[in-house]
Amino acid sequence: MSPYLSSDVHLAIFGLCMGLVSSVLVSVCAWYYLRRVRIERPPIGTFNGRDIVILFVLLSTIPLFYLLLPRWLLTSFLAVTFLASISIGFGPVLRPTHLWLAIGSLIGLNIWMGNNLLGTAFGWQMFWAENDIIIVLGAVSVANLYVQGGMKMRHVAWFALALAGYDMIFTTIWPVTNALVEEFLGYPLDPSMGMRWGFDNAATGIGDLLVYALLVLTAFKAYGRRAGQIALAVVVAFGAVVPAFVPLLINYVDSRTDTLVPAQAWFGPAAYITYRIMRSHYGRERTMKEFEASSDVVHPHIPILGPPAWDIVDPADSPVSPAPTLAGAAGPSGVRRP
């Protein structure tokens, strides 16, 4: 074995660590956001089955579009995409000046780091850490936009099941995913969350992270905290653990010696089964309105204040006699009526 090639067990453990951190971090942050922040959306209706079909077609064809674009145009397209998604999600949280300054700084720094720091392992680690921030913010924003717009758990279940077939075909039969990894690795605004250790890179695509967060959010919105925790456990098991260790049993190594695991092929069926069990056990899913009226949402605390001190006047302490009010009118405390 070449001294520059890590063992399969080492790669599995590294992939497990990265998969756990990325899937749990995005899902938990999206959950925290859903409980506290509301995204302003235009009155265009709620999510339905047709929207899921449109979303699946877009996510299936856009990667092919990526492969045809020149590098400068692809980077520009990704910059606009991340700018739009993060601004929608965090517009209700930050003032406009702070929001655009933060987004511009993150994207600008990412482009600079991607073009200047990737010559060393430490430079890769710095790039991945900064890139991961953008991915988390983008995934949290888009997941909440869909869920607050009416996406239900049944939509996510069918969507994940369709992605399972897509992922299997375009990873093992027609290696489109392999070409995308080769296209993005080593360039700015990589649409995946990853890290480098020595000569090894481990990453999870933003599409996978989005589906994980959607399952957790829709389960929580539909059936409450316990259901959300179960969905998070499914994400950990079939979104992080299984994809990390299945290469020890199945050869997913491509011609460039990259190990590309079709994670949705394992997660999609598990997500669908989870939905069917919850549907059978809990029944109808809550609507967004019912969810917002529940105790699962953190409502802002508005303290009940008493009247200001200057509203309460003792006539005995006043140096000037108060003017009489209109006869029959109820005056404030401390003011006598004629």
Image: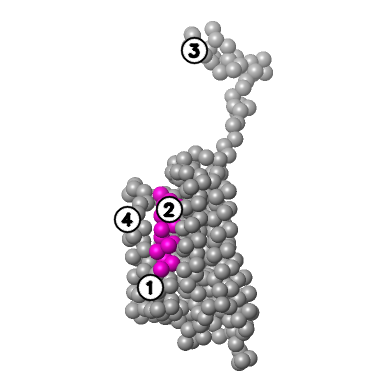
Dot 1 or dot 3, earlier in sequence: 1
Q: Quadrant of residue 309?
A: top right
Residue 97: give its label: none
Residue sitting nearer the eye, 336 or 154: 154
Decide: marks 2, 3 in contact (CB < 8 A)?
no
Q: State whether the magenta stretch is mostly helix, strand or loop.
A: helix
Circle 1/circle 2 CB separation < 8 Å: no
- Judge depth for marks 2 and 4 and give the one in front: 2
- 1 or 4: tag closer to the N-terminus: 4
Kindly identify which residue carries mark 4. Answer: 50
Q: Quadrant of the C terminus?
A: top right
Label 4, secondary structure: give it: helix
Query: Upstream in the sequence, badge 2 or badge 3?
Result: 2
**Cα gap from disc 2 to disc 3, whole angstroms:** 61 Å
The kind of residue tagged 4 is Arg
Residue 20: horizontal and vertical position, in percent?
Answer: 59, 66
Tell me the tag on residue 154. Answer: 2
Q: Is residue 234 above or below residue 176?
A: above
Where are the magenta residues, as a range? 150-165
Instruction: Residue at the far right: name it.
Output: 317
User: Which colour assignment does the render follow?
Assistant: one colour
Q: Which of the two discs, 1 and 2, labels the residue nearer the N terminus?
A: 1
Residue behind mark 1 = 63
Depth check: 4 or 283 in front?
Answer: 283
Residue named by callout 3 = 329
